[in-house]
């Protein structure tokens, strides 16, 4: 069951990220973020409205949901700033280390222990994704690491915390509730930002002109996060995170097929390492 949700998350994120990138390029980060989170809020409301009373009485669960929402907001802002100031070829590889942060938090805070082979496979996945994301070794010269790198490291650390809180929060409440709560929080924050910056006209215009894109991006992103949260009900948080992060391989494959992108030798090596390690980890987890 957990593996099924993990692989659904991989597919949903692979397609969803492509659509989100397209949305952000078409009408900007804040509008895209508002549309995606507002869609998830509306779509999930019928499934969680009956449990809201229980959430109010679940002090620990409510605190975790609030913490996850705040971390997502701060991590998202740091992410945007890192991408604005740094090189994508440097920023993307740094983001792979959120798996390590998630694994460490699950071990330290809730005592999730992994077998040596599982740890080795997780590290292999991180290494493989790092190779895929790294365009050139020259990008990692010290002079190129100044802009955006520190912000990316901070964003990665916080996203590792978000991953952990999603898994832990799903267990304290339920997977749909944490997705609904965080989406509502982000929709309210981004909505207020848009109102403050007089973007209501742009919002209504883009909604009218791009309903299909907004619906598709929102649907796949909501499916991805919900599937990821469900996967962590049945699998250790570190394993679920490691497997789902391999959606980067799917995204690279889509780039090769549809955009005629070419990978370098070290990226093909990362491709192979990630696929082999992920399949092996999934097989072990199923056992």
Image: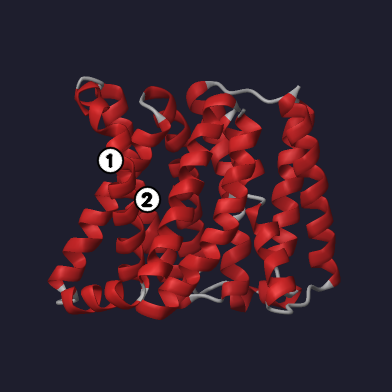
Whether 212 is drawn above or below 11: the answer is below
**Residue drawn at x 56%, y 27% as measured from the top left:** 107
Return the x and y of residue 52 as percentages of the image width and height. 22, 29
The picture places residue 137, in percent across and down from the top left corner, at 75, 73
Residue matched to label 2: 72
Q: Closer to the camera: disc 1 or disc 2?
A: 1
At a point 75% along the width and 35% down the height, the residue shown is: 281
Q: Tell me the SS state at disc 2.
A: helix
**What mark, if any, has residue 45 been given in the picture?**
1
Nearest the eye: 66 or 137:
66
Q: Secondary structure at mark 1?
A: helix
Could you say which quadrant of the image residue 286 lies in? top right
Q: Label 2: few (<14), some or many (≥20) within 10 Å?
A: many
The answer to which quarter of the image holds residue 85 is: bottom left
Q: Quadrant of the C terminus?
A: top right
* Front-lying residue, 212 or 214: 212
Residue located 37% across and 41% down the image: 179
């Amino acid at each position: 069951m957990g593996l099924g949700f993990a692989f659904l998350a991989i597919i949903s994120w692979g397609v969803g990220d492509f659509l989100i990138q397209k949305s952000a390029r078409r009408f900007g980060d804040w509008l895209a973020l508002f549309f995606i989170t507002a869609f998830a809020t509306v779509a999930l409301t019928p499934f969680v409205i009956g449990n809201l009373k229980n959430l109010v009485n679940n002090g620990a669960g409510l605190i975790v949901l609030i913490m996850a929402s705040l971390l997502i907001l701060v991590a998202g802002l740091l992410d945007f700033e890192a991408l604005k100031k740094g090189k994508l070829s440097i920023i993307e590889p740094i983001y792979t280390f959120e798996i390590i942060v998630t694994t460490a938090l699950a071990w330290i805070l809730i005592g999730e222990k992994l077998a040596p082979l599982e740890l080795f496979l997780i590290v292999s996945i991180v290494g493989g994704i790092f190779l895929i994301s790294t365009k050139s070794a020259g990008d990692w010269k010290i002079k190129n690491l100044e802009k955006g790198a520190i912000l990316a490291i901070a964003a990665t650390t916080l996203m590792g915390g978000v991953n952990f809180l999603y898994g832990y929060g799903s267990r304290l409440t339920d997977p749909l509730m944490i997705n609904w709560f965080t989406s509502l929080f982000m929709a309210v924050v981004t909505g207020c930002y848009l109102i403050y910056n007089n973007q209501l006209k742009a919002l209504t215009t883009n909604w009218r002109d791009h309903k299909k894109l907004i619906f598709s991006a929102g649907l796949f992103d909501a499916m991805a996060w919900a599937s990821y949260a469900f996967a962590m009900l049945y699998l250790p948080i570190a394993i679920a995170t490691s497997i789902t992060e391999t959606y980067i391989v799917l995204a690279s494959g889509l780039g090769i097929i549809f955009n005629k992108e070419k990978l370098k030798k070290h990226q093909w090596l990362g491709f192979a390492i990630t696929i082999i390690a992920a399949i092996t980890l999934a097989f072990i987890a199923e056992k």
